[in-house]
């Protein structure tokens, strides 16, 4: 999935005429971190998804669904694109929920530290 999102990020960045440095600045991350997202080496895009969508003026679903439709163009039948989009959406939700749990765990840990 990182490669799907990375390819989409690269395409969106080029359509906007941004350099990797500019895109990284908009997301408040380093250029090298952004480059790793584009190459699929990093899944940190999931923690920046809201900002990515704002910068590129897309929805989270748009970030994932475009590649799924391309996959469907090489197959027969209309249900495979729906299935692929469903799987990608579920994975995105899982990653988002994991990040939220991680945030809650950190907050709880910090609250405990304050109470001690």
Image (cartoon, helix red, strand yellow):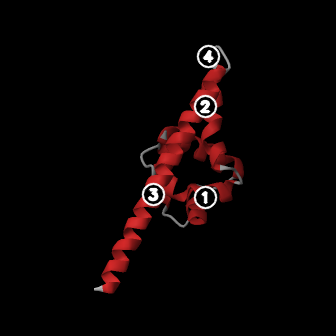
Task: Tell me the distance, in whole angstroms, between the alpha carbons under discs 1 and 4.
Answer: 32 Å
Q: Position of residue 84 (x, y in %)?
A: 57, 30
Q: Alpha-carbon distance for marks 4 and 2?
A: 11 Å
Q: Nearer the viewer, mark 4 or mark 3?
A: 3
Q: Residues within 10 Å of mark 4 (few under 14, many from 20)?
A: few
The residue identified by callout 3 is 99
Q: Position of residue 70 (x, y in %)?
A: 64, 28
Between 19 and 50, the residue placed more toward the observer is 50
Considering only order in the chain, which callout, 3 or 1, is on the residue closer to the N terminus?
A: 1
Residue underneath mark 1:
50
Upstream in sequence: badge 4 or badge 2: 2
Q: Are marks 1 and 2 in contact (CB under 8 Å)?
A: no
Sequence-wise, the earlier of marks 1 and 4 is: 1
For mark 3, give the secondary structure: helix
Q: Which residue is mark 2?
A: 68
Instruction: Please give the name of the residue rendered at 60% of the width and 34% of the height, measured from the top-left corner.
Output: 85
**Helix, strand or loop status at disc 4:** loop
Taking the image as shown, residue 91 lies to the left or right of residue 86, namely left
Sequence-first disc among 4 and 3: 4
Which quarter of the rendering shows the C terminus?
bottom left
Which residue, as the protein is rendered here, is positioned at the far top? 76
**Sequence order check, earlier mark of 1 and 2:** 1
- The residue to which callout 4 is attached is 75
Q: Quadrant of residue 110?
A: bottom left
Q: What is the spatial separation of the Cα atoms under label 3 and label 2, in whole angstroms?
A: 24 Å
| CA distance for labels 4 and 3 | 34 Å
Q: Is disc 3 in contact with disc 2, using a CB cutoff of under 8 Å?
A: no
Instruction: Give the residue at x 38% y 66%.
Output: 105
Q: Please say whether residue 32 is visible from this viewpoint.
A: no
């Amino acid at each position: 999935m990182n490669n799907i999102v990375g390819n989409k990020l690269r395409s969106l960045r080029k359509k906007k005429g941004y350099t990797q440095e500019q895109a990284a600045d908009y997301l408040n991350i380093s250029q090298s971190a952004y480059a790793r997202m584009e190459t699929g080496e990093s899944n940190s895009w999931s923690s920046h998804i809201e900002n990515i969508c704002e910068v590129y003026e897309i929805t989270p679903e748009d970030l994932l669904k475009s590649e799924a439709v391309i996959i469907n163009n090489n197959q027969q039948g209309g249900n495979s694109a729906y299935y692929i989009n469903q799987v990608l959406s579920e994975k995105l939700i899982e990653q988002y929920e994991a990040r939220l749990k991680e945030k809650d765990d950190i907050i709880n840990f910090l609250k405990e530290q304050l109470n001690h």
